[in-house]
Image (cartoon, rainbow, N blue to C red):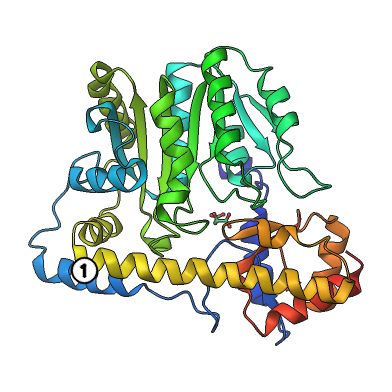
Amino acid sequence: MFENLKAQPADKILALMQAYREDPRETKIDLGVGVYKNAEGVTPVMRAVKAAEKVVWEEQQSKSYTGLIGDPAYSDAMIKLILGDAVPRANVGAAATPGGTGACRQAFELIRMASPGARIFVSDPTWPNHISILNYLGMEMVPYRYFDSETRGVNFDGMLEDLKQAKAGDVVLLHGCCHNPTGANLNLVQWREVVDLINAQGLVAMVDIAYQGFGDGLEEDAQATRLVASSVKECLIAASCSKNFGVYRERTGLLMAVSQDSGQTTLNQATLAFLNRQNYSFPPDHGARVVTTILNDDALRADWAAELEEVRLSMLGLRQQLADELQRLTGSDRFGFIAQHRGMFSRLGTTPQLVEKLRAEHAIYMVGDSRMNIAGLNAKTVPILAKAIVDAGV
Ligand code: LMR
């Protein structure tokens, strides 16, 4: 049997992570995988996470199973964090999942189950693992124009034009904030237009929100997702705590199925539980419990929000520093988009050949499509990157 196995294509983000580890050059800079690093290059355990883990350790009396959807208190706290008061709780079915990837995977499976012929419209580009999982599940994908390689902003007209090709029942996959891999985002006026189009054409919205708090702030970053949830007939929302709680390896995510018809919620919820059971039974609990502990305790929550805000502001500062440095070196504003982008990533918008040159000659690692993880920088490495970008002829 094993002889029939075929080597699968390497995930380009994870392959890059490996190549970086193996590079002996001391000057190397890792702008690859989307993991936050502080100025010392460390991905710290957040203060509130440490404190909540202590609480869990002291209070937890059993490691027996939770429910198939995880602890309902986790769903409640996360729904409140992401959706605020945008939709009544009774309209939301939810289940804990192993990270945001698990939530996306379960969402895709639910779509395939409920609507086997639906096509998934994905932004061009989108997170490579969206494509990889959809391919693996044999689901049809249609790219819609998103990134404007001239302005490095969103090609909004192109996006609308392409989404108009979608038929009733097709699914539109949207990034709730901090678009991965480009860093270019819609404004709220544009979001409203997308929502109108979804409603006019009878499409289904799916929102992937993995970076709440990394863009313009916790509330601000949730606005688009709240708008979608409160304005469309039904939608799926895949959420991750990996980044904003820094609990990457704990695999802490949530999938929500939101319907304007609250009579649908029991079945939606039961379907999410069923999908969990088929794939891994009970979702991981530790990260979810830590997140719940933080969100339900005023002091821990305030400390978490404050540290997240420090993280957000540090990335904004690095963006500005890089844009300013490039302005200084080139005498032009053509890299000004770096300060406009939001979240962890910016797509530089250069060729794979120049990305390779940056790696070979300057030990700078970014994803082949020229996605840079801004959090991989610090005040000292920004000028090194800026000079390399200019020297390489980007
Ligand atoms: C990324 O895009 O780098 C992160 O979401 C990590 C991952 O799993 O790819």
| Residue 309 spot, x, y in % from top left | 43, 67
For disc 1, the neighbor class at 10 Å (few under 14, some 14 to 19, many from 20) is: few
Quarter occupied by the N terminus: top right
The image quarter in which residue 393 lies: bottom right
Q: Residue at x 68, y 74 (%)?
A: 321
Against 58, residue 199 (above or below) is above
**Residue 272: quarter of image:** top left
Left or right placement of residue 372 versus residue 267 in this view: right
- Seen at 50% across and 79% down, the residue is 42
Nearer the observer, 393 or 115: 393
What residue is drawn where x is 44% and y is 22%?
232
Up/down of 139 relative to 375, above or below: above
Q: Residue furthest front?
A: 189
Q: How far across and down, in percent of the image, does residue 300 sit?
A: 24, 67
Note whether 366 is above or below 130 in the view shown. Answer: below
Q: Who's the residue at 87% across and 66% down the image?
A: 332
- The x, y position of residue 67, in whole percent, is 18, 41
Location of ligand 1 given as a quarter of the image: bottom right
Q: Nearer the viewer, residue 77 or 246?
A: 77
Label 1 sits on residue? 299
On screen, residue 129 versus residue 286, left or right, reads right
Residue 329 % position (x, y): 86, 76
| Element assignment for label 1 | helix
Disc 1 marks a residue whose amino acid type is Ala
Number of marks drawn: 1
Against 98, is 158 above or below? above
